[in-house]
Image (spheres, coloured by chain):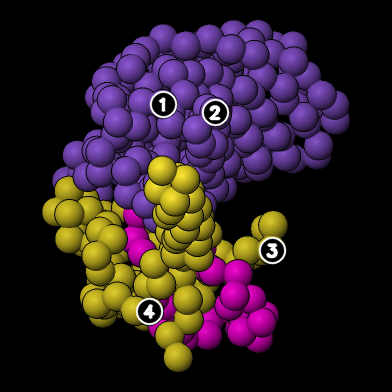
């Protein structure tokens, strides 16, 4: 009887450690957009799709199983709480592609200037005056 | 094409009144759910809002998918199971600061105000009231407020298996960093 209790205790302890390790080291991470299948598109075309066909563009681009690889020129660069946001020209003064960058990219983004051409990979969240993307990284 | 033209005309018509309007595209809304089982928090840093400093009319709109969670699993449950963000991608508030006349936008300072309006989540609209603080500094005004929201009021059903992990009342922190639009 005593052995059974000890074994149950050991199994319970190992299970608890395994669950803790999983939560700590795996589930806490975000998916890396650069590791996902990518949809390649220009900033101009992405904006045109959302501003003209928002519902279908949302279904097509605002997904989590695919990342967006968007190319364009930088129209604005700002940093808030150690996180850069890069805006891309769309050819339409009414809106931009707003890319909230992953902070691991900060050193590379510091070197970028307005009007530089970039490729940015991230997840699209949809359209709200601008097209919003987050967890973005610079394409290598 | 009609949708785009309509939006442009709507914004242009608002532009003529921009002398009294404050706007942000980087408003922040955070929410917290605290239970003995689990704490859940998320933050949306891309909230779009307009405040009319003369009439007190105030609106904000956000994309539900722009809520940033500490892990993907929480985010997936939030978007797919609870908020159904593919079907209802946005949440909106349309309301009014009822005592906007007490705020002097030409004078730096902190002003306490009251507001009321309609909050729409998942196509369910509820009346809400609250208090806010507006801090005026030059051409900028920062509005902050705290709200409490019950998920079940907005048709957000939590399965029994997760009910113990999600609070019945969610705390919401709102910060709108407005800049004056000339």
Decide: few, some or many residues near mark 1? Use Cα within 10 Å; few <14, some 14-19, many ≥20.
some
Circle 4 or circle 3, nearest the eye: 4
Q: CA distance from mark 2 to mark 4?
A: 36 Å
**Pointer 2 with pointer 4, Cβ within 8 A:** no
Which mark is in front, 3 or 2? 2
Q: CA distance from mark 3 to mark 2?
A: 32 Å
Which residue is situated farthest in the right direction here?
B108
Q: Is residue B41 left or right of residue A92?
A: right
- The label number, if any, that marks residue B164 in the structure image: 1
- Magenta span of residues: A97-125
- The chain painted yellow is A
How far is disc 1 from disc 3 in space, using C-alphas? 35 Å
Mark found first going from the N terminus, 1 or 2: 2
Where residue A77 sits in the image (x, y, percent)? 60, 69
Q: Residue furthest left?
A: A56
Mark drawn on residue A34: 4
Query: Foreground mark, 4 or 1?
Result: 1
- On the image, numbered disc 2 is attached to which residue? B36
* Chain for disc number 1: B
State the residue at coordinates (65%, 86%). Answer: A111
Q: Residue A82: which disc?
A: 3
Quarter where residue B139 is shown: top right
């Amino acid at each position: 009887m005593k052995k059974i209790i000890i074994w149950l205790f050991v199994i319970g302890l190992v299970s608890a450690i395994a669950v803790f390790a999983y939560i700590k080291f795996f589930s806490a991470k975000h998916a890396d957009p650069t590791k996902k299948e990518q949809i390649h598109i220009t900033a101009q075309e992405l904006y045109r799709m959302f501003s003209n066909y928002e519902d279908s563009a949302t279904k097509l681009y605002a997904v989590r199983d695919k990342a967006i690889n968007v190319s364009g020129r930088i129209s604005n660069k700002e940093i808030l709480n150690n996180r850069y946001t890069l805006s891309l020209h769309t050819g339409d003064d009414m809106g931009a592609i707003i890319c909230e960058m992953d902070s691991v990219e900060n050193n590379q983004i510091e070197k970028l200037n307005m009007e530089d051409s970039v490729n940015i990979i991230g997840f699209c969240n949809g359209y709200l005056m601008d097209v919003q993307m987050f967890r973005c990284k610079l394409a290598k | 094409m009609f949708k785009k033209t309509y939006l442009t005309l709507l914004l242009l018509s608002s532009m003529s009144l921009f002398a009294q309007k404050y706007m942000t595209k980087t408003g922040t809304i955070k929410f917290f759910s605290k239970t003995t089982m689990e704490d859940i928090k998320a933050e949306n840093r891309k909230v779009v809002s307009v405040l009319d400093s003369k009439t007190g009319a105030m609106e904000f709109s956000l994309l539900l998918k722009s809520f940033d969670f500490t892990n993907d699993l929480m985010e997936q449950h939030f978007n797919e199971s609870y908020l159904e963000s593919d079907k209802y991608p946005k949440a909106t508030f349309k309301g009014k600061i009822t005592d906007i006349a007490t705020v002097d936008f030409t004078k730096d300072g902190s002003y306490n105000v009251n507001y009321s309006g309609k909050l729409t989540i998942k196509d369910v609209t509820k009346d809400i009231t609250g208090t806010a603080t507006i801090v005026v500094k030059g051409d900028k005004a920062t509005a902050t407020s705290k709200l409490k929201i019950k998920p079940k009021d907005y048709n957000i059903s939590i399965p029994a298996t997760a009910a113990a992990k999600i609070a019945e009342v969610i705390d919401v922190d709102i910060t709108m960093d407005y800049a004056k639009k000339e």
